[in-house]
Image (cartoon, helix red, strand yellow):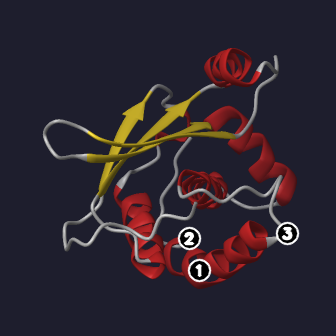
Amino acid sequence: MHETGHLTKKRNQWVWIRDSRKGNLRIRPYKRLLDAVAEHLGVRGYTVTIVWTNDRKIRELKHRYLGMDEPTDVLAFPFHETWPDGTHYLGDIVISLETASRQAREKGHDLNVEVAILLIHGFLHLLGYDHETDQGEMAALETVLRRQFLATVSDKIKWKD
């Protein structure tokens, strides 16, 4: 299932939970990134929670829900429900800033770029894309989205140790 949004002009809501202060990341540029990606995909009227956490907590989640006892960079938990107040809740994206930081160093770019990549990846999972079962559809779309949107935000995302 690939969500294309509701027949609404309502904007998406991005709710951040900072369970980790690593990197002192600012939310506004990531919100702009997600707004642009959602607009490109025609996704409107959803609420998504983004959790920035550490390796210990993401490892606990991965073990509890996937049966794997190891940290990871990003987990996506799709919900696709409508709450009594009318909120269309798409799901949660959980990112380990510790793993993201390591991956950024290994790849030779900043943490801000890695987090942006992981947000796009997690958002696509919430929309029903699955790189483990599709025929490269998610990877191809992710490549397009990265090329189109990362360059426009990477210099605007500030990160401090």
- Viewer-side label of 3, 2: 3
Residue 97, located in which quarter of the rendered image? top right
| Quarter of the figure that contains the N terminus | bottom right
Residues at marks 3 and 1 touching, judged by CB atoms closer than 8 Å: no
The residue that disc 1 covers is: 151
Who comes first in sequence, dot 3 or dot 2? Answer: 3
> Marks 3 and 1, how far apart in space?
27 Å
Residue at position x 47%, y 46% in the image: 25
Q: Identify residue for label 3.
A: 135
Q: How far from the left and from the top, in percent, is residue 20?
A: 50, 28
Residue at 75% in and 34% down:
72
The x and y percentages for residue 134 are 80, 63
Q: Residue at x 83, y 52 (%)?
A: 132
Tell me the crowding category of disc 3: few under 14, some 14 to 19, or many 20 or more residues within 10 angstroms, Cα based. few
Q: Is residue 140 above or below residue 97?
A: below
* Separation of marks 1 and 2 at Cα, in angstroms: 6 Å
Amino acid type at circle 2 is Ser
Q: In the rendered image of this protein, does residue 55 appear above or below residue 101? A: above
Mark 3: amino acid: Gln
User: What crowding class fits label 1: few (fewer than 14 Cα within 10 Å), some (14-19), or many (20 or more)?
Assistant: few
Label 1 residue SS? helix
Disc 1 + disc 2, Cβ < 8 Å: yes
Tag of residue 154: 2
Q: Nearer the viewer, residue 150 or 50?
A: 50
